[in-house]
Image: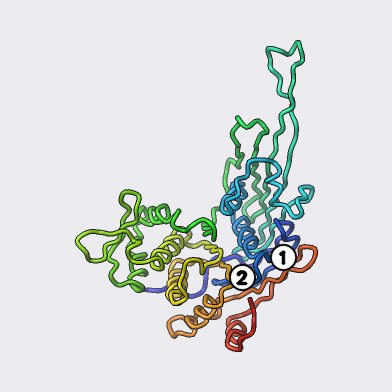
Amino acid sequence: MQTKSSKIKKMVNSIKIERLRGIRECILEDFGRFNIFLGHNNCGKTTVLEAIYLFLGNDNIIGNVNINNLRQLIVDSDEKYKLNFYNLDTEQSIILSGIYDNAQRKAEFKYWEHFAEALDVNDIKDKQTALEKEYGLQQTFDTPVGTYQSKLILSSDKDKQARVEVPKELGSHINSVYLSSIIGHSNYVNDFYSTVLKQKKEDKLIAILREIEPSIKDAVIADNLLMVDIGLKQRVPIQVLGDGIRKIFDIIAAMFQCENGVLLIDEMENGFHYQSMPILWRAIIQTAKELNVQVFATTHNIDTLQAVNAVLQEDAYKEMQSQWRAFTMRKFSEGVLKAYKHTYEQFSYLLNEDREIR
């Protein structure tokens, strides 16, 4: 396969997170093409991924709904919307600021609510009124190409549907895909692969998969199932090849969805046997280079770290060592989350010395 330059063209360079969920403040700088967040359970790794996901959207507030859906949290009341705010304090805005493609960006999210009198015009003379509460979120995004505002509007009247107000002229779109640790990747793989088929890029994807599983000749969607040709009399569901190859297919298909953009994976080791991790990392590194994708992932699994350490020492992938970053996240009092950055050389040394960096 022909490969592109290892230098990524556009990427998230840095981000500052203020008052999102359990994080009052966190600053992360000097991202590479491949970035992995380490740390104890509940230290805020997933929230960092969510912050980057929100930071990349500039014209649609629906991302705030998506991050809750990905946690399987159905937000159907004003109290649940307040969960996005540090200490549930909606008087203070959520602010995400940083650099993308060497240019400053800033997103601010505010909670709002007000009460309005709902009058029945037939009963005005009797002054029959009722208070109806409207609430929601307002997003203001400052980007190099302009400032964009959007608004999510909900009502205490359960019969009224939520409304979204977005700018008439949308800003530049940054492709991004967030793969949740809770919702299975395969819930989306048909959508991802449908995009690949529409763009006539299936040959590229199959070529990558064939280096992992040579028997794969092609893949189609039939009866809402992903079917692969492995040389038998008929195509078979991809599940026949085993869980590992199916999950790798999910992730690679997602990377095609966010070409020239960003892929975010929460707890990337979920569902993989440790012996499959080197195969997964080779596929991710190769595809990211081919499609110009920046990758962010979380883990606290030592097998995952040892696998990528070994893969980056292979001749075919050594050039990507300079694009690798690991961030050990440590939470301190008052909601401060500190990130300790490791280059590949530091990361590899600490692993080889059996030092704890998770």
User: In the picture, residue 341 is in which quadrant?
Assistant: bottom right
The residue sitting at 55% across, 72% down in the picture is: 34
Q: Decide: few, some or many residues near mark 2? Use Cα within 10 Å; few <14, some 14-19, many ≥20.
A: many
Can you say whether 157 is above or below 28 in the image? above
Mark 1 in CB contact with mark 2 (< 8 angstroms): no
Q: Is residue 34 left or right of residue 209?
A: right
Percent coordinates x, y for residue 250 in the rendering: 43, 61
Could you tell me which residue is drawn at 49 percent across and 79 percent down? 307
- Residue highlighted by disc 1: 26
- Would you say residue 109 is visible in this rendering? yes
Amino acid type, residue under disc 1 in the picture: Cys
Q: Nearer the viewer, residue 149 or 156?
A: 156
Left or right? Give the position of 189 relative to 33.
Answer: left
Specify the quadrant that holds the N terminus.
bottom left
From this view, report whether residue 112 is shown above or below residue 19.
above
Q: Nearer the viewer, residue 193 or 224?
A: 224
Disc 2 residue type (three-letter): Phe
Which of marks 2 and 1 precedes in the sequence? Answer: 1
As drawn, the residue found furthest toward the top would be: 125
Residue 60 in view of the camera: no
Q: Residue furthest bottom?
A: 353
Q: Position of residue 202 (x, y in %)?
A: 34, 60
The image position of residue 2, as x and y in percent, is 37, 73
For label 2, the SS is: strand
Which of discs 1 and 2 lies nearer the camera? The answer is 2
Decide if residue 297 is on the left or right side of residue 195: right
Q: Please tell me the numbered disc located at residue 200.
A: none
* Camera-side residue of 105 and 64: 64
- What residue does disc 2 label? 37
Cα separation, mark 1 vs mark 2, equals 13 Å
Q: Residues within 10 Å of mark 1 (few under 14, many from 20)?
A: many
